[in-house]
Amino acid sequence: MTSHTPHGHATHTERARSVAGHAAAVAELLQPLRAADRIETLPLSRALGRGLVHDVAAPLSLPPFANSQMDGYAVRSGDIPGGSADLRVMPPVPAGSSPQALQPGTAAPIMTGAMIPAGADAVVPIEMAVPDHFMEPGRGRAVELPATTPGRFVRAAGSDIAEGERALAAGTCLGPAQLGLLAALGLPEVAVYRAPTVLLVTTGDEVVEPGRPLPPGRIYDSNGTLLEAAMKQAGLTVRRAGISTDAPAELRALLRTECRGVDLIVTTGGVSKGAYEVVRQAMADQPVDFLHVAMQPGGPQGIGTFDGVPFLGFPGNPVSCLVSFEMFLRPALSALLGAPAPRLPVRARLDLDGQGRPLTSPVHKHQVRRGSLQPDGTVQLVGGESSHLMHALAGSNVLVHVPAGVTELAAGDEVEVWML
């Protein structure tokens, strides 16, 4: 975090902070979320989307015993030395049973997933047998089976994971597959980080709650719904405090009333250099820096603490505040807590058909554009550079990244995109 200047304002001579530098500052601010007293043990049914605290070693092998990959006959491969052989049929081996050892010259009907009998080393699928259906065991009954090789259609014990191996690494975001693995290992619960609680405040005299009359010169608040949905999707617990006016004293009073028990305060609007920047004014006596990040959109940012509670101030334009969340808050939580899962970065080629000109970007800024990733691996830009285009944002499925130093991209150029 930058050094604090009087009244919490960054100096006018300060250069714009890099995206990486601000991301690191946000991660440092939120470091207390990793404290030991924030760890909780939950049953698997309640751990979806949480971050794993510790490495998990497999307490047993998967599968725990050699089992059949097919419905068929468990055999000793050495009993079928040539093209085929007639083997006496033994009692069947259903899944979940503990079979008797297989005697030489015999074949045991076996179901998928059932334990391989001692002495057997292969399975012949039922469709390769003559007859190609299971028979009732009885004196003298035999089945003709083709030659096979040791290990054929047998799932070896530990072929998925061996006892003692690391099953999941600390910091893993627990999705359905990860929770399924823990269940398969017989683990009923898991240690995870507690989901942070965020106080979300929209600011501005010009902003009106959706559903109310819209006077001239006013706009409906989209930021509150936009960020609340993004935060909840990321696994955060969100507390909405409504819309604050542009009176600094009222905002301070609102924050002090609502911030009890929250882990982070996030505001939207009032962080730039205009005449009525209520968040800047309300934080005048707090250790908060207001600075510019070399990013477009989302350059103006606030970071610090309010009455000891971590604070982030996002810009007021809708696209800017969502980009701020995606670039700074979401990645910090992913790195610190393992949840939410990081956005998946993929490479795509620009499709600029219909635009008629290349994509341009300021040389010293990291530009984030909205785009639509197509099935053929190309990405089409949606909307322009402006940060108020909600309709364009709603039609996007990726964020398109143009790093600082890149000033122009043509059709067919490769770019990094983050899946939304």
Image (spheres, rainbow, N blue to C red):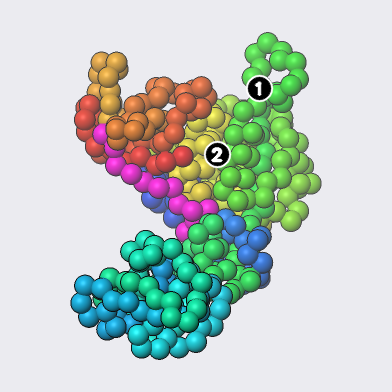
Residue 45 location (% of width, % of height): 65, 61
Q: Residues within 10 Å of mark 1 (few under 14, many from 20)?
A: some
* Position of residue 300 in the picture relative to residue 280 (left or right): left
**Amino acid type, residue under disc 1 in the picture:** Tyr
Residue 286 visible to the viewer: no
Q: Is residue 58 within the magenta segment?
A: no
- Which of discs 2 and 1 lies nearer the camera? The answer is 1
Percent coordinates x, y for residue 88 in the rendering: 40, 80
Count the marks: how many?
2
- The residue identified by callout 1 is 220
Classify residue 207 by image quadrant.
top right
Report whether residue 230 is seen.
yes
* Mark 2 surroundings: few (<14), some (14-19) or many (≥20) residues within 10 A: many
Using the image, tell me which numbered label, if any, was put on residue 59. none
| Measured Cα–Cα span from mark 2 to mark 1 | 18 Å
Given residues 50 and 369, the one toward you in this image is: 50
Q: Position of residue 279 (x, y in %)?
A: 63, 37
Q: From the viewer's perspective, is residue 405 above or below residue 339? A: above
**SS at badge 1:** strand
Q: Nearer the viewer, residue 347 or 168?
A: 168
For this rendering, which residue is in front, 177 or 350? 177
Residue drawn at 46 percent across, 67 percent down: 134
Residue at point 60%, 66% (across, down): 192
Q: Which residues are magenta?
A: 333-349
Q: Position of residue 291 (x, y in %)?
A: 48, 42
The single residue placed furthest to the right in the displayed view is 257
Identify which residue is drawn at 35% across, 66% down: 130
Q: Residue at x 29, y 42 (%)?
A: 347
Q: Residue furthest front?
A: 140
Residue that badge 2 annotates: 314
Residue type indicated by callout 2: Phe
Sequence order check, earlier mark of 2 and 1: 1
